[in-house]
């Protein structure tokens, strides 16, 4: 009882600045650069580490693409049941993940809603490029983000372009702070109708990728709506291992979080443990300080 009380007092006495040594160690263990932003949606209280540094998003950028697509649905420019023809030339290269390409190499037809599910829940590169083109390209996505007051998330190029040159991925970039603020804005109902927000939240909650990242060290059954992002590994260097989304805390409050690991020489386990460990620090901080 005494030990537990002392631990609680220690947690209550901490400030986010006191967490820096723990994040420093996680960064060293990741063998790369770590960026973290965890923000309470209701209050704006934050735990951050290198949160204003730019990181390549990789597939995390499919979240803002999804928001912009649904904004077009809200405005009547697109319909969820609208059928989109996908040809063989629309498919991303074999080096990129695409269940659509694998199942329909010669082409197929899918609705906007089906493409959205493939893009977010299955991180399908073909779906992402088709929707990116359908909604007006990278400039349209970035303009939409600026309209929400999100200045440090930039969608600049496509999956196909990233597949051709590893350096291109650094153009699709975000700071952890800005990405967490985008998820906070999303949770607060900005930028989308309630129906569109509910649909995107559903497909993010159903995503199966990255179970050892944000979810990795959280209590069993914790609800997480998120989007992962992962680059290839070239000559032992992995440019991006990311996860970002919304965590439902034990008290029902929402925590917006973005954890990015850049240019790591670590293996998959080291990179994913870094994300899980950073998330757990934020979880414990907000659970202990409330």
Image (cartoon, rainbow, N blue to C red):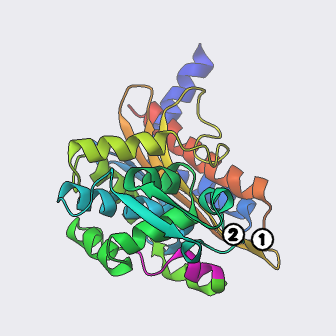
Q: Position of residue 173 (x, y in %)?
A: 47, 75
Q: Quadrant of residue 102?
A: bottom right
Residue 157 falls inside the magenta stretch: yes
Side (left or right) of 212 relative to 141: right
Residue 236 falls inside the magenta stretch: no
Tag of residue 245:
none
Q: Position of residue 154 (x, y in %)?
A: 39, 76
Q: Which residues are magenta?
A: 154-163
Q: Nearer the viewer, residue 4 or 205?
A: 205
Task: Give the residue displayed 71% in from the left and 71% down from the top.
Answer: 94
Q: Looking at this view, name the residue that lies furthest to the left.
A: 75
Task: Give the residue displayed 59% in from the left and 35% down from the top.
Answer: 218
Tag of residue 265:
1
Q: CA distance from mark 2 to mark 1?
A: 6 Å
For the residues bearing labels 2 and 1, Cβ distance under 8 angstroms: yes
Secondary structure of the residue carrying tag 1 is loop
Location of the N terminus (image quadrant): top right
Q: Is residue 8 above or below residue 254?
A: above
Q: Quadrant of residue 99?
A: bottom right
Q: Which residue is mark 2?
A: 32
Location of the C terminus (image quadrant): top left
Q: Is residue 232 above or below residue 197?
A: below
């Amino acid at each position: 009882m005494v030990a537990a009380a002392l631990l609680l007092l220690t947690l209550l006495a901490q400030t986010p600045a006191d967490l820096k040594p723990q994040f420093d160690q996680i960064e060293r263990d990741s063998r790369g650069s770590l960026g973290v932003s965890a923000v309470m949606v209701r209050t704006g209280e934050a735990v951050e580490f290198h949160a204003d540094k730019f990181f390549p998003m990789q597939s995390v950028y499919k979240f803002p693409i999804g928001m912009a697509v649904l904004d077009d649905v809200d405005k009547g420019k697109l319909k969820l049941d609208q059928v989109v023809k996908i040809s063989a030339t629309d498919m991303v290269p074999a080096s990129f993940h695409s269940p659509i390409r694998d199942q329909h190499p010669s082409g197929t037809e899918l609705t906007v809603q089906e493409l959205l599910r493939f893009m977010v829940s299955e991180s399908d590169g073909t779906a992402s490029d088709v929707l990116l083109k359908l909604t007006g390209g990278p400039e349209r996505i970035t303009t939409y983000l600026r309209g929400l007051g999100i200045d440090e998330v930039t969608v600049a190029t496509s999956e196909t372009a990233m597949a051709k040159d590893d350096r291109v991925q650094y153009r699709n970039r975000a700071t952890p702070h800005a990405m967490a603020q985008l998820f906070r804005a999303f949770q607060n109902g900005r930028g989308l109708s309630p129906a569109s927000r509910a649909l995107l939240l559903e497909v993010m909650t159903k995503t199966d990728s990255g179970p050892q990242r944000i979810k990795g060290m959280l209590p069993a059954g914790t609800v997480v709506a998120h989007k992962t992002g992962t680059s290839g590994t070239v000559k032992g260097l992995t440019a991006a291992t990311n996860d970002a989304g919304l965590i439902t805390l034990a008290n029902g409050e929402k925590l917006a979080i973005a954890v990015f690991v850049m240019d790591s020489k670590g293996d998959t386990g080291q990179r994913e443990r870094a994300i899980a460990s950073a998330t757990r620090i934020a979880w414990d901080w907000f659970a202990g300080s409330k």
